[in-house]
Image (cartoon, coloured by chain):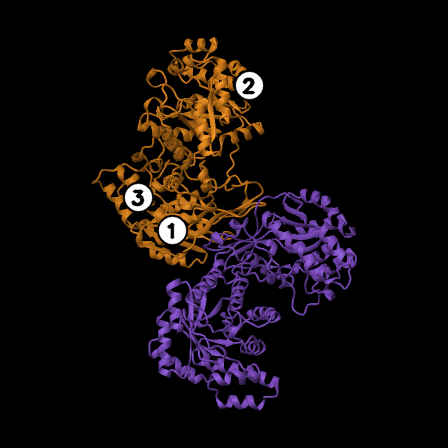
Chain colours: A orange, B purple
Amino acid sequence: MKIIEKVQSAIAAGRSFYSFEYFPPKTEPGLNNLYARIERMGQWHPLFVTITWGAGGSSTDLSFDIAKNIQNLTGMETMMHLTCSRLSRREIGDVLQATRQRGIQNIMALRGDAAGGGAWQPHPEGFRFATDLVRFIRESHGDYFGIAVAAYPERHCKEATYAQELGFLKEKIDAGADLVITQLVYDIDIFLRFVDECRQIGITCPIIPGLLPIHNYRSFTKIARFAASIPAKIVERVEANKDDDEAIKAYGVSLLIEQIACLQAAKVPGVHLYTLNLEAVVTQALEQLRLPVQSDEKPLPWERPASVRRSHEDVRPIFWANRPKSYLARTMGWDEFPNGRWGDSRSPAFGDQDAFALEQALPSHFDPRRAWGEAPTTFQDIMDVFVSFCAGETPAIPWYDSPLARESGPLREPLMLLNSRGFLTINSQPRVNGAPSGDPAVGWGGPHGRVYQKAYLEFFLPAPVLPALLAALEAQPSFSYHAVNTHGDSISNCPHVNAVTWGVFPGREIIQPTVVDPVSFMVWKDEAFALWKRLWGAIYDEDSPSRALIQRIYDTFYLVNVVDNDYVDGDLWATFTALSASLGAHRCEP
Amino acid sequence: MKIIEKVQSAIAAGRSFYSFEYFPPKTEPGLNNLYARIERMGQWHPLFVTITWGAGGSSTDLSFDIAKNIQNLTGMETMMHLTCSRLSRREIGDVLQATRQRGIQNIMALRGDAAGGGAWQPHPEGFRFATDLVRFIRESHGDYFGIAVAAYPERHCKEATYAQELGFLKEKIDAGADLVITQLVYDIDIFLRFVDECRQIGITCPIIPGLLPIHNYRSFTKIARFAASIPAKIVERVEANKDDDEAIKAYGVSLLIEQIACLQAAKVPGVHLYTLNLEAVVTQALEQLRLPVQSDEKPLPWERPASVRRSHEDVRPIFWANRPKSYLARTMGWDEFPNGRWGDSRSPAFGDQDAFALEQALPSHFDPRRAWGEAPTTFQDIMDVFVSFCAGETPAIPWYDSPLARESGPLREPLMLLNSRGFLTINSQPRVNGAPSGDPAVGWGGPHGRVYQKAYLEFFLPAPVLPALLAALEAQPSFSYHAVNTHGDSISNCPHVNAVTWGVFPGREIIQPTVVDPVSFMVWKDEAFALWKRLWGAIYDEDSPSRALIQRIYDTFYLVNVVDNDYVDGDLWATFTALSASLGAHRCEP
């Protein structure tokens, strides 16, 4: 949605907010770190994030890619900077088109800085002022975009007076911008005076102060000191600690807390934080401030990304429940979610696995050999890893973007048992029969609703026990199942889409956000089997017995999903506990 | 669906079947009687019905209209006859297009009879043989249509030998027909021999014998005797009773029973009955035969008509629940039900009230003055009619196509009470929390499912008590409501679509076949208010006090719907019983 709308509703509700600014890093590892960092910082619920435009030589595509990925793979509303530098009108038009195409709805329209220290030069077929860019966006895309512009509470450049700068800002608003974010502010009084003067010349939209926390001495001296008036006592404190990183950081935290408190006292509702892609000072300050954050409500059992294209999405296959980014990446190219459903797009869809999505699977600093074994050689070694994951001791297996879901808590014991018996589980949920939608473990959706789940279990299994398993499943009239191996040999008793999570809410249609279906399962199985080799097998030498073991599992195991349709009285876990004891899957050495 | 598929699955299941043939009547009252009769006979679950083409001068449009209405307003799969007589290829193409457009999927392709006793003449730009028509249908519409053709177990015309006739039939099958229905058969042996000979020349599709029951002496002598060999003993029995209508009818019944039994003994799975638009002989025979009929299962709480265009329809507003034909007529022009939903078509939709749909509201032989009062002058008179309807004493009120729904049984007492207190109820359902889908009262859908309902109540109410009612409703957090008068003054606390009937089935998505929604309610209110005047007020003289009373109700009352979203613990009826006692609506003389 448009950020101005989020800002206005936060103001209307009297809710403080903050936003984070990031810039495109220069290296590939830097990029992966940045994604992880943006996501971690996302747990602080910034009202929005901004991605700066690649001024000064870095690729413009990278800014767009980062903004696109954050907007489409996370729930954070993302504002992409866009400058007039080095772009023709036509190129800007193309960027806007691509931006819209990828569901980004917010642009920060800037003139841009001069490259390499010289004077700023407009592109010969481009725009001269940010005002022109704002006007162009409105002319070519109407009301689609939220448009923020920059303001300079202190005089910006030598060519213009302070009064002229104010006039330029008014022009940008009149051209169609709806939100103002200021350059760095250290002296809160200067900011407040500036806001007063904006109001006097008829600028009525929200004006958010930009704060650059003091992350370290270097950034302070290189950036801050040249960009804003800094109260003497701040400079003194920093200079006094210039050789003590920790002390500067600690001061950065306390200064940020003081600034935010001071702005809140002056009824300034929110702040924009220039993170410089750094985490510590910002999160420590927020932690200590204990601002009442956005409520942590779950409108659906899974998180819908911010992309405007997915705003009506309300059904997903369960298979990617533990790898949501992979699902989002695969479906990012879909033109629409008709009626909020993934369903109609199923045949043409499911783009190829996206490297970004796949590599996200493992936590940073994760050592796969330590977690999954230096040299596993038996099925028992593999089972031990799965059991250890269920027990919470191993932090990750290839099929989980994140640790075991909180709902699975009560399932921990039965899952450990199943894995110790050769049922290598990778996804599960318990049955739920009309729990209140506010239930802390299984609830989702608005108030006063009731939510339901069919019990679900998905696991890898050695092929020799499959016939006995299927016979046992057929004896359970309430079970739907689907088994498939990597070669596509497929056995199922349910050709339809089966809703496995749904909710009933006052004054609403029934919502069924999670389904099990045969079509997307066949797509998922390719990914699920590939993860054995790509993430696990690949950590061992090519000719090692461990690599061969993983390859044999890949070649011979079946991936099986089972739904117990009896969500009222069924006991999938008791059935599987009994089955796993009798089938002896753990004795099948691959 | 295609009738050949229904026939084949009946054969595969070893289920006997029969179908009924009707012809377009010559008069308007005859037409209304025919609709009522086809519907009544529909309770015998014919596998399909056929409508003959208007040969010999009657309007071709009427055949199409009847087939269209039966296909679209009832659940009976309808086959429309189409002949080559008097139609150019282009005109036939137009008919096929219109037929398809209206969701009819089955055609009986015939050459047609000669008009007025002369020799048959092809249209100069038309077809000469039924084979040409079959080929044209296949060429222009591929596999869309099921195509039946006629067969003549006895020699048909002087120009061709019996062997040639057999060859013509083979040609019609080879051209694309998939089902054979024979001309009148009285001598079962002749039919069986004919089938044998068809099989010998490679005709493999089902061949259904056509039986003309002996309805009366006149039809027997005028039609049957000239069209088929009739065993002597049949002729004797009819001639012996030629002056005794009842005796002939009784013989017609016993003969039909004998013929069907004889065909069943010969493993002929089904028969096609030429009803001549007459009811008694056919239904009496079927009653005595006690054939195992199609199961009376309800795939949805409401009956989906046979139209192929509606085969995915699975959501409807609750408002027309008691006037389904009106809803069907209004939505017949909709191009599609995307994803089985009425939802997306809501704005452009809801065609004007169709006379056929409206006039269906009252049972035949219904005397409205006797039922609704010779000269009501007070609100009490009106309330008495509603109470009497709820008690099952008055057979109809204008808002019900059919008597009180069976689910309303347990609601009878509270509804009588509410009506006696001035809440004129026209629609209601009790809450249901996960009843088995096989429940005889509230069940629907396939086996092993569970069905749910939110309690619903809809009623007319005098305007003076509305504010007190709304205050009371607002005090109930689980209630959604919408009140509107004939002028469109509208008050509601629920702007969304609210599912009020849904079901959960093994291996399936959640189905929510009935909803309450604000948009269609505003359309329904026009119809609901209009019915006061069109069906009730109109029975009184223009200047009568009764007419004026109805007009005042029309002008001043509110139509109110209320949903209790608490389908687990709510008690809508207790709330309304208490409310109705305190509000004193019955004292508001309109």
Q: Nearer the viewer, mark 2 or mark 3?
A: 2
Which residue is tagged 3?
A530
Letter of the chain that mark 3 sits on in the rendering:
A
Q: Which image quarter: residue B303?
A: bottom right
Q: Which image quarter: residue A400?
A: top left
Badge 1 crowding class, 10 Å Cα cut-off, few under 14, some 14 to 19, many 20 or more, is some
Q: Is residue B35 above or below residue B188?
A: above
User: What secondary structure is found at the residue carrying circle 2?
Assistant: loop
Letter of the chain that mark 2 sits on in the rendering:
A
Q: Is residue A7 left or right of residue A29?
A: right
Residue at the limit of the structure toward the left, as seen here: A543
- Return the residue nearer the eye: A92 or A358: A92
How far is the residue under mark 1 from the one under mark 3?
18 Å
Residue at the limit of the structure toward the front, as seen here: B124
Q: Name which residue type carries label 3.
A: Ala
Q: Earlier in the sequence, mark 1 or mark 3?
A: 1
Q: Name which residue type carries label 1.
A: Val
Q: Is residue B517 left or right of residue B84?
A: right
Q: How many marks?
A: 3
Do the CB atoms of the residues marked 1 and 3 lie less than 8 Å apart? no
Residue B94 badge: none
Q: Name which residue type carries label 2.
A: Ile
Which residue is tagged 2?
A201
How far is the residue under mark 2 from the one under mark 1?
60 Å
User: What secondary structure is found at the residue carrying circle 1?
Assistant: helix
From the top left corner, tell me how far across and down residue A70 is, in percent: 41, 33
From the top left corner, tell me how far across and down residue B249 is, in percent: 58, 83
Which residue is tagged 1?
A519
How far is the residue under mark 2 from the one under mark 3?
62 Å
Q: Nearer the viewer, mark 2 or mark 1?
A: 2
